[in-house]
Image (cartoon, rainbow, N blue to C red):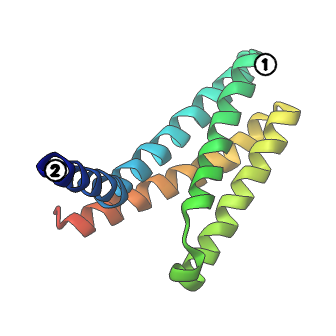
Amino acid sequence: MAMNTYGNAFNTYKSNSVNFASKDQMLLMLVDGAAKFSKIGKQAIIDKDVKKAHENIVKTQNIFYELMTTLDVAKGGEWAESLMKVYQFIVRRLMDANIKKDVLIMDEVIPLIEDIRDTWNEAYKVSKGVK
């Protein structure tokens, strides 16, 4: 009985810490990753390393797919809908950049990705009361 209570309490704690405490941190790690992988992808296009470019652009796209699936449009309303449109635009442009191996398209999306990263970082600091 005692062990089972402990087990249940631990599972509750574990799922809550994943859902709450680290949800923000996961988001920050994802958007940081997207910024990093998109830059590696761009450099790989410049270096004519097709495989590396493809892999890193796909990693970036996958991060945005993940962000899209976790975005609660029902709760977030218009703000979340706008963000979803930005995410969809980025994914579309990443696909174009990957197909064409086009540095100019990467130059267009990387600042957007960095803006998103910076916005989420600021929001995180505000939510945690960090000055």
* Amino acid type at mark 1: Val
Q: Estimate how packed mark 2 is, as few (under 14), some (14 to 19) or many (20 or more) residues with alpha carbons within 10 Å.
A: few
Report which quarter residue 77 is drawn in: bottom right
User: Of callouts 1 and 2, which one flags the residue occurring earlier in the amino acid sequence?
Assistant: 2
- Residue at label 1? 50
Q: In this view, does 72 lie to the left or right of 19?
A: right
At x 59% / y 45%, what residue is drawn? Answer: 63
Relative depth, front residue between 10 and 125: 10
The relative height of residue 130 versus residue 76 in the rendered view (above or below) is: above
Q: Where residue 107 appears, x then y in whole percent? A: 68, 42
Q: Which amino acid does label 2 sit on?
A: Tyr
Identify the residue under disc 2: 6
Measure how far apart labels 1 and 2 are at the Cα level. Answer: 52 Å
Q: Is residue 76 left or right of residue 94?
A: left
Tell me if residue 68 comes above or below residue 11 in the rendering: below
Picture quadrant of residue 121: bottom left
> In this picture, is 22 found above or below 72?
above
In the image, residue 75 above or below residue 115: below
Q: Residue at x 63, y 76 (%)?
A: 81
Q: Which of 30 and 23 is in front in this view?
A: 23
Of all residues shown, which one is farthest toward the bottom? 77
Q: State the residue at coordinates (82%, 30%).
A: 101
